[in-house]
Image (spheres, grey):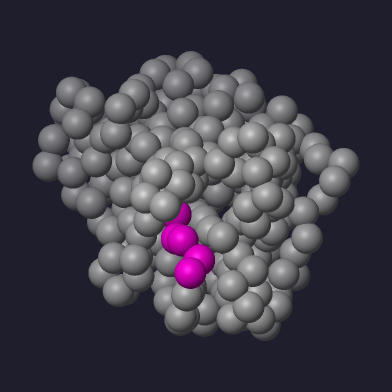
């Protein structure tokens, strides 16, 4: 028996994005539950993104920098609208950089070669730490709520950055007419015959009040904000942050973070959960 056996763990992601972590938790004997808190929409004004993508395809950029998996979904959707595949939008002379192993896996699964990604600190800060080129033309599509640090850091290193809002982060659910519809490859979003139960905010509140949740995974800074706005108090439920930016935002909001994943991956999150429960067992 391991420290996750019998534990009930809530994942604050949509069901499709929660599947890889849910599958791993189930294999470790835990019961994964899902609470979608945020969703994503295409921006109402597509002109800036379309113009930048035209420039990307024409070879106007030395680098394409991807800072989230959702950005990949946007690019897949835009490619499909043009009747091409994503690799058709990125010419051979344009290098691709990203912020960590999960986004690298997604990009490589759709046929793009990742030229640069941090191995240790998997975040915008980690990418800036290994960025050693200057005077480069960089295309940086991001969320509407993306922190300015990556754009400003690249600019400070001499890059000419074209930063475009690629999608909007909204409360779940997104509006049907603007919701992202492109799916990630099946090898990235793993199929799972036993779908995890999806809870509402009200059902989650009841589970927290009855102390029927052992842990909750904050899957992004925006999810941490929604947790603070809708689910407090958490009581005995331990909050696990997917990475340092999420942990920092949760702490800023007054939430107690029991552990932070060293890597923003299912394996990293499970390791953080196991450390929390192992430490509790050692103190009893």
Q: Residue at x 64, y 27 (%)?
A: 110
In this rendering, the answer to whether 131 lies above or below 271 is: above
Q: Report the label total.
A: 0
Q: Position of residue 237 (x, y in %)?
A: 50, 66
Tell which of 254 and 276 is nearer to you: 276
Q: Which residue shows up at 61% across the image and 59% down it?
A: 10
The picture places residue 11, in percent across and down from the top left corner, at: 60, 56
Is residue 28 placed above or below 108 in the rendered structure? Answer: below
Q: Bounds of the magenta span? A: 236-241
Q: Quadrant of the N terminus?
A: top right
Q: Nearer the viewer, residue 147 or 271?
A: 271
Quarter of the image holding residue 192? top right
- Residue 138 picture quarter: top left
Residue 28 spot, x, y in % from top left: 66, 36
- Quick one: which residue is furthest to the right in this view? 193
* Residue 146 visible in the snapshot: no
Q: Is residue 135 above or below residue 275?
A: above
Q: Quadrant of residue 272?
A: top left
- Identify the residue at image location x=70%, y=78%: 203
* In the image, residue 50 lies in the stretch drawn in magenta: no
Residue 18 makes an appearance in the image: yes
Secondary structure that dominates the magenta span: strand
Give above or below for 108 relative to 222: above
Q: Residue at x 40, y 61 (%)?
A: 221
Q: Residue 242: horizontal and vertical position, in percent? A: 44, 48
């Amino acid at each position: 028996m391991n420290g996750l056996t019998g534990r009930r763990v809530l994942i604050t992601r949509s069901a499709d994005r929660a599947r890889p972590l849910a599958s791993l938790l189930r294999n470790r004997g835990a019961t994964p539950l899902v609470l979608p808190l945020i969703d994503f929409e295409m921006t109402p004004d597509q002109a800036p993104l379309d113009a930048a993508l035209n420039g990307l395809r024409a070879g106007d950029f030395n680098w394409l920098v991807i800072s989230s998996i959702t950005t990949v979904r946007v690019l897949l959707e835009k490619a499909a609208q043009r009747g091409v595949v994503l690799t058709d939008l990125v010419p051979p002379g344009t290098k691709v950089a990203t912020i960590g192993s999960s986004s690298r896996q997604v990009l490589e699964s759709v046929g793009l070669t990742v030229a640069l990604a941090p191995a240790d600190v998997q975040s915008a800060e980690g990418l800036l730490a290994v960025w050693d080129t200057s005077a480069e033309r960089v295309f940086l599509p991001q969320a509407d709520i993306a922190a300015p640090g990556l754009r400003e850091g690249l600019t400070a290193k001499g890059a000419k950055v074209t930063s475009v809002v690629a999608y909007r982060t909204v409360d779940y659910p997104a509006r049907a007419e603007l919701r992202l519809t492109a799916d990630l490859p099946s090898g990235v979003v793993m199929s799972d015959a036993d779908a995890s139960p999806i809870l509402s905010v009200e059902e989650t509140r009841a589970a927290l009040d009855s102390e029927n949740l052992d842990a909750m995974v904050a899957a992004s800074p925006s999810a941490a904000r929604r947790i603070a706005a809708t689910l407090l108090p958490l009581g005995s439920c331990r909050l696990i942050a997917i990475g340092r930016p999420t942990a920092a935002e949760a702490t800023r909001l007054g939430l107690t973070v029991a552990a932070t994943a060293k890597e923003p991956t299912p394996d990293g999150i499970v390791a953080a959960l196991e450390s929390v429960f192992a430490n509790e067992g050692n103190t009893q």
